[in-house]
Image (tube, helix red, strand yellow):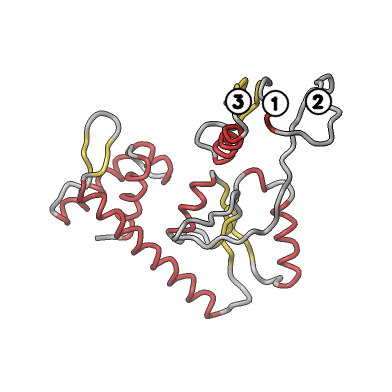
């Protein structure tokens, strides 16, 4: 079995769609299908249940996915360890981050780090928080800036780098616009501009509103 086959297999398993996996990998759909078929032939089992446009893993496919992810994680770590061993003050740090940190926090951190380690470069990976966390777990990136800090994930170690204040952005004519501080329940009757469902900030806001005793009314998602 080839490393390329395993990478294709993981991507198809994650997206449950061959054409979307091929687009993400920047290869032809036929190439992905062929490599998956070759892998299944070599193993002598079906890794996917095929039906309609989407496919899903078989029970043995689920087992295989877990093992393959662990194996690729170790291979990526081994490659990275060798590079660091050969020259610890050079090389590249693969850094993941969400859009929200790109404007100010991230450039400041990189700038300060490079003052002390000018020979080390950065390879930046932008994506959703879940995508970034998954990439750290399998060794595709070395470190990530995410919020909230993943304190309860046994596969990750999280450290609080900084904290931020959440502010309510209101029209100047709003009755609460002149207040210096607000309780969340004071906004229970106002429409919210929200993150998309599935975004971690969406979950945080919904949870905070629930704790304050109301369900926010969403006017827009973005």
Circle 2: is it few (<14), some (14-19), or many (20+) Cα within 10 Å? some
- Judged from the image, the secondary structure of the residue bearing numbered disc 3 is loop
Q: Determine whether, in the image, residue 151 is placed left or right of residue 4.
A: right
- From this viewpoint, which residue is outermost toward the left? 44
Circle 1: is it few (<14), some (14-19), or many (20+) Cα within 10 Å? some
Where is residue 138 drawn, in percent x and y?
42, 59
Among the two numbered marks 2 and 3 on one chain, the one whose residue lies closer to the N terminus: 2
- Judged from the image, the secondary structure of the residue bearing numbered disc 1 is helix
Q: CA distance from mark 3 to mark 1?
A: 8 Å
- Judged from the image, the secondary structure of the residue bearing numbered disc 2 is loop
Q: Determine whether, in the image, residue 183 is placed left or right of residue 92.
A: right
Where is residue 189 drawn, in percent x and y?
67, 20
Q: Determine whether, in the image, residue 80 is placed left or right of residue 58.
A: right
Q: Determine whether, in the image, residue 27 is placed left or right of residue 208.
A: left
Which numbered circle lies on residue 216?
A: 3
- From this viewpoint, which residue is outermost toward the right? 178
Q: CA distance from mark 2 to mark 3?
A: 17 Å
Among the two numbered marks 1 and 2 on one chain, the one whose residue lies closer to the N terminus: 2
Among the two numbered marks 3 and 1 on one chain, the one whose residue lies closer to the N terminus: 1
Looking at this view, is 131 or 199 the one in front? 199
Quarter of the figure that contains the C terminus: top right
Q: Verify CB contact (< 8 Å) between mark 1 and mark 2.
A: yes
Where is residue 122 drawn, in percent x and y?
62, 61
Where is residue 5 drawn, in percent x and y?
29, 54
Residue drawn where x is 22% and y is 31% of the image: 51
Rendered position, 193 above or below 134: above
Q: CA distance from mark 1 to mark 2?
A: 9 Å
Quarter of the figure that contains the N terminus: bottom left
Circle 3: is it few (<14), some (14-19), or many (20+) Cα within 10 Å? many
Pointer 1 residue: 187
Looking at this view, is 101 or 84 the one in front? 101
Which numbered circle lies on residue 176?
A: 2
């Amino acid at each position: 079995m080839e490393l390329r086959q395993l990478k294709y297999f993981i991507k198809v398993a994650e997206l449950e769609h061959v054409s979307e996996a091929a687009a993400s990998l920047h290869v032809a759909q036929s190439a992905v299908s062929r490599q998956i078929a070759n892998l299944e032939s070599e193993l002598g089992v079906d890794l996917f249940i095929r039906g309609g446009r989407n496919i899903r893993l078989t029970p043995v496919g689920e087992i295989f996915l877990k093992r393959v992810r662990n194996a690729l994680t170790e291979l990526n770590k081994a490659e990275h360890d060798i590079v660091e061993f050969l020259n610890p003050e050079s090389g590249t740090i693969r850094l993941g981050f969400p859009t929200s940190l790109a404007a100010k926090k991230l450039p400041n951190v990189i700038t300060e780090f490079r003052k002390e380690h000018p020979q080390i470069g950065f390879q930046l990976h932008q994506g959703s928080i879940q995508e970034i966390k998954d990439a750290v777990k399998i060794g595709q990136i070395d470190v990530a800036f995410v919020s909230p800090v993943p304190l309860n994930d046994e596969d990750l170690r999280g450290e609080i780098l900084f904290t931020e204040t959440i502010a309510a952005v209101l029209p100047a004519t709003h009755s609460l616009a002149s207040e210096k501080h607000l309780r969340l329940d004071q906004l229970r009757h106002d429409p919210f501009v929200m993150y998309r469902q599935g975004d971690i900030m969406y979950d945080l806001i919904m949870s905070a509103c629930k704790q304050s005793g109301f369900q926010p009314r969403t006017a827009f998602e973005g």
